Amino acid sequence: MNYRERFEAARVPDAGEFSGRYAVSLSVPLMKRIRFFGHFKSFPDGDGDRGFNCFLGLIRIGAFRLERGASTMPDGLEVMKIIYDDRSNPLPLRMLTDEVREERPGFCFCRGVVDILGKPVVVMYFTLEKLEG
């Protein structure tokens, strides 16, 4: 099963299912997963549909909001979107939208989509895995 098929086979999670921290790992062919600088996404309790990225447990960057809807890709799949279009983020990051689908409880397969000259392009696939505690 290729990455696109894997993504399509997963289900759409609800925003309310996200709380706490999720490890972010890049999916790379021929390798299991790669995790950079302890990267995780944090969905603080009580913030509902908002969160941020964190590196090395100290550096917060990439504020985002969650929104369920149709993918920006031509397949039009229903996805949970992680939208970085926030004034606090640097411009290149604001152009990125992560699209999330859940493979099993606490484990999501995702794709990063960037609009390049009016055309959406998948620039990466990655996983989110719920961290304990």
Image (cartoon, rainbow, N blue to C red):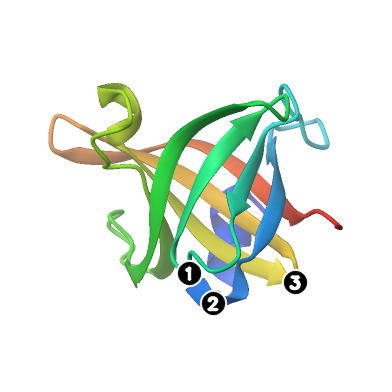
Left or right placement of residue 22 versus residue 132 in this view? left
Mark 1 vs mark 2: give the one in front.
1
Q: Which mark is residue 27?
A: none
Residue that mark 2 sits on: 16
111 up-or-down from 107: above or below: above
Q: Amino acid at mark 3?
A: Arg
Are circles 3 and 1 on residues that touch, CB within 8 Å?
no
In space, the residues marked 3 and 2 are separated at their CA atoms by 16 Å
Q: Secondary structure at mark 1?
A: loop
Are circles 1 and 2 on residues that touch, CB within 8 Å?
yes
Q: Which mark is residue 48?
A: 1
In space, the residues marked 3 and 1 are separated at their CA atoms by 21 Å
- Which badge, 3 or 1, comes first in the chain's sequence? 1
35 up-or-down from 97: above or below: above
Q: Quick check: can you spot residue 12? A: no
Q: 61 and 82: which one is in front?
A: 61
What is the count of numbered marks? 3
- 10 Å neighbourhood of mark 3: few (<14), some, or many (≥20)? few
Residue that mark 3 sits on: 104
Q: Secondary structure at mark 3?
A: strand
The quadrant in which residue 126 appears is top right
Q: 118 and 82: which one is in front?
A: 82
**Residue 124 in picture, x, y percent from top left:** 52, 35
**Residue 114 in picture, x, y percent from top left:** 32, 36
Left or right placement of residue 63 versus residue 39 in this view? left
Q: Residue at x 31, y 23 (%)?
A: 90
53 up-or-down from 13: above or below: above
